[in-house]
Amino acid sequence: LWVDDLDGNEMNTLLDKFDVLSTDAAASTELRRRLRDEVGANAQGLFKTAAKAKSAAAAAVKALPADATEAERATAASASQRRVFETFIEVEQSGAFAEVDNLLTQVPIDEVTKQRLPDQ
C-alpha cells in the first residue's frame, strides 16, 4: 500500500494532535523543519515516531522528583521528544544512504559501456 507523504500543514497537524514538538519552542520548530526537509513527512513513520516521543516524554516526566516544577517537567518532556525525533532523522538518513549504497553495489555493469565495473 502506497501512501503519499504528508504536506507541511498535515505533518504539523499530526504532531500537534500528538502534542509533540511544540511550536512554542524554537528548537522544536527547527526540528519540525528538519523532519520535513531532511526525511520527508511519511505518515506511517511520523505516526510511530510521534507515539514513541509521547511515551518518552511521559517517562522523562515520571522520572523527575515529585517536587519538580512545571517548567522542569516541560523541559524534560520537550528534550526527550526532540531526542526521539533526532534519532528518527538519523536513522532515516542512514537508511537512505545504505539503500543507495546497496543499489549501487548491485549494478556490476556500466550501462553506458556495457563493461564490468572494477570492484572497489
Image (cartoon, grey):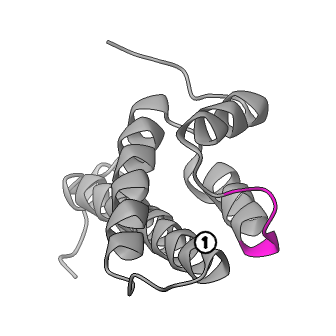
Quarter assignment of residue 78? bottom right
Q: Report if residue 97 is visible in the image.
A: no
Chief secondary structure of the magenta portion: loop
57 and 52: which is toward the camera: 57
In the image, residue 44 lies at what x, y percent?
A: 39, 32
Question: Within the magenta stretch, is there residue 35?
Answer: no
Where does label 1 land, which residue? 74
Quarter assignment of residue 118? bottom left
In the image, residue 111 lies at what x, y percent?
A: 36, 46
In the image, residue 24 lies at what x, y percent?
A: 81, 61
Q: Quadrant of the N terminus?
A: top left
Residue located at (19% from left, 53% from top)? 106
Residue located at (69% from left, 32% from top)? 13
What crowding class fits label 1: few (fewer than 14 Cα within 10 Å), some (14-19), or many (20 or more)?
Answer: some
Secondary structure found at label 1: helix
Q: Quadrant of the C terminus?
A: bottom left
Residue located at (34% from left, 55% from top)? 55
89 and 108: which is toward the camera: 89
Residue extending farthest to the front is: 67
Left or right, residue 27 beside residue 47: right
- Kind of residue sitting beneath label 1: Ala
Q: Report if residue 109 is visible in the image.
A: yes
Quarter assignment of residue 48? top left
Left or right, residue 10 beside residue 74: right
Q: Report the magenta residues as a range.
A: 22-27
